[in-house]
Image (cartoon, rainbow, N blue to C red):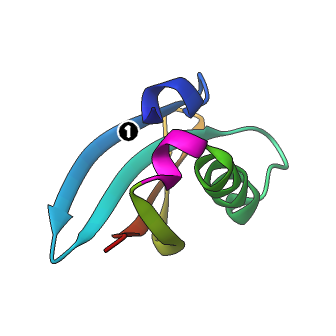
Amino acid sequence: ELSKITPDDMAITKLEFSRKKLIISAVSNLSDGQKEFTVVENFMKKIDENIEFNKNFKNIKFGNLEKEHTNNDELLSFQIEAKLKK
């Protein structure tokens, strides 16, 4: 389900499941003038609205954020956490 909702300019780099939490690590290109939190919020909204994903997970929240500059590109690395439903 994550691959279906992940934008073309974003890649999921790591999935980790520990202590009943799924941690999704991703990286995305930032367009000129695009806000970092907008990218993360939009992706979190897509996850939250996905019925299949939400059958098993709840409390989707932001983990951390890091911005990098490489070869004239701005990259945004971030994590999102989702708790497993009981």
Q: Which residue is mark 1?
A: 12
Q: Is residue 2 visible?
A: yes
Label 1 element class: strand
Give the quarter of the figure containing the C terminus.
bottom left
Magenta stretch: dominant SS?
helix
**Above or below: residue 5 compared with residue 68:** above
Q: Residue at x 41, y 67 (%)?
A: 82
Give the quarter of the figure containing the N terminus.
top left
Coordinates of residue 85 in the picture (x, y in percent): 37, 70
Query: How many tags in the picture?
Result: 1
Coordinates of residue 67 in the picture (x, y in percent): 52, 60
Toward the viewer: 13 or 76? 13
Q: Is residue 73 magenta?
A: no
Q: Is residue 8 left or right of residue 26?
A: right
Coordinates of residue 80 in the picture (x, y in percent): 45, 64
Q: Residue at x 53, y 24 (%)?
A: 4
The residue most toward the right is 33
Q: Is residue 65 visible?
A: no
Q: Residue at x 63, y 49 (%)?
A: 43
What is the crowding at mark 1: few (fewer than 14 residues within 10 Å), some, or many (at least 20)?
some
**Above or below: residue 78 compared with residue 71:** below
Q: Is residue 54 magenta?
A: yes
- Looking at the rendered structure, the kind of residue marked 1 is Ile
Q: Is residue 5 left or right of residue 79?
A: right
Q: Answer with the quarter of the image where residue 79 lies.
A: bottom left
Give the extent of the magenta segment: 51-55
Q: Answer with the quarter of the image where residue 24 lies.
A: bottom left
Coordinates of residue 36 in the picture (x, y in percent): 68, 60
